[in-house]
Amino acid sequence: MQTVYDLAGLRAVLRAWRQQGQRVALVPTMGNLHAGHHALVRRAQQCAPRVVASVFVNPAQFGPGEDYARYPRTLQQDQAGLAALGCDLLFAPPVEVMYPHGVAASVSVHVPELTAMLEGVHRPGHFDGVATVVTKLFAMVQPDDAVFGEKDWQQLQVVRRLVRDLGLPVQIVALPTVREPDGLAVSSRNQYLDPAQRALAPRLYTTLQWMRRQALAGHVHEAIERAAVAGLARMGFEPDYCAIRAVETLQPAAGEPPHRLIALAAARLGGTRLIDNLPFTA
């Protein structure tokens, strides 16, 4: 596997593949790769004969007081893991390649409506950073397919929306959330949890399962959400939200059929913020 750090090197490799008529799939990541990322790469290999993985810790999607500085950066480990999977190319640009005029002076991409709720309330500006870096990566790699995990469900809907609205020729492929045996969604941030917090963390997923059962039993969504928040707080979480929403718009879902619903939650354990979701069709 080859690693490139600049646009000239990236374009040289891509040009050779395109001249051979080869389809290209992209797996955007922030590095510190785990089983969930590896599953994304394997899914990308089913989409295209050539796979590019990107590793870039994007400063534009971290807010003040968030964990940008301490976010784990493990490039050598990531390279070894991707090479073992048979990934074709790793694009690992420094900040100055992605933001040549600095983050504050960069062109920014904003997706309205979808970004004004849930994560958007608790992480202002986060989705502008996500939408901007994804758009940049799509422009740089020009992939035929791009693979994203469903764990960041709101992010997935934001990416789908920007692709539709901008008319980008990229097929967005979604992969179901990869979980630990106890149900905890695989995440780079799980390593921040101490043993007691790690033992408690799967209760976020069991709360989502409870929310789904209650909703399917016909209980009022708002009452379920309030009870779920209170239950997490009693367990020792600091919940930001528990919500039942329409799967695509993420609007309040009263009147939607069950197969069009999803439960979402975000909560802190100590200094670690966890998010998860459960589509009702899962």
Image: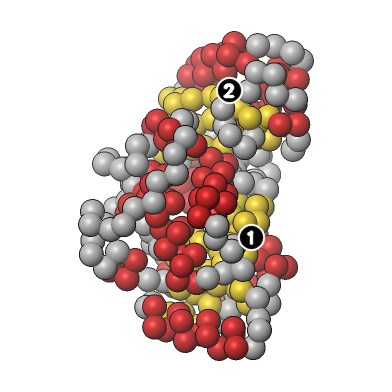
Residue of label 1:
171
Q: Position of residue 225 (x, y in %)?
A: 57, 18
Q: Residue at x 59, y 83 (%)?
A: 18
Q: Residue at x 54, y 14 (%)?
A: 226
Q: Nearer the viewer, residue 43 or 272?
A: 43
The correct choice, above or below, for 99 with respect to 205 in the image is below
Is the residue marked by circle 2 packed among few (<14), some (14-19), or many (20+) residues within 10 Å?
some
> Residue 95's image quarter?
bottom left
Q: Is 275 placed left or right of 103 in the picture?
A: right
The answer to whether residue 202 is seen in the rendering is no
Q: Residue at x 44, y 39 (%)?
A: 112
The correct choice, above or below, for 133 with respect to 271 in the image is below
Residue of label 2:
252
Q: Residue at x 57, y 51 (%)?
A: 164
Q: Nearer the viewer, residue 184 or 260?
A: 260
Quadrant of the rendering where the C terminus is positioned = top right
The amino acid at mark 1 is Gln
The answer to the question of whether label 1 and label 2 lie on touching residues, with beta carbons closer than 8 A, is no
Distance from Cα at disc 1 to Cα at disc 2: 27 Å
The amino acid at mark 2 is Pro
Q: Earlier in the sequence, mark 1 or mark 2?
A: 1
Q: Position of residue 230 (x, y in %)?
A: 51, 15
Could you tell me which secondary element the residue under label 2 belongs to? loop
> Residue 133's image quarter?
bottom left
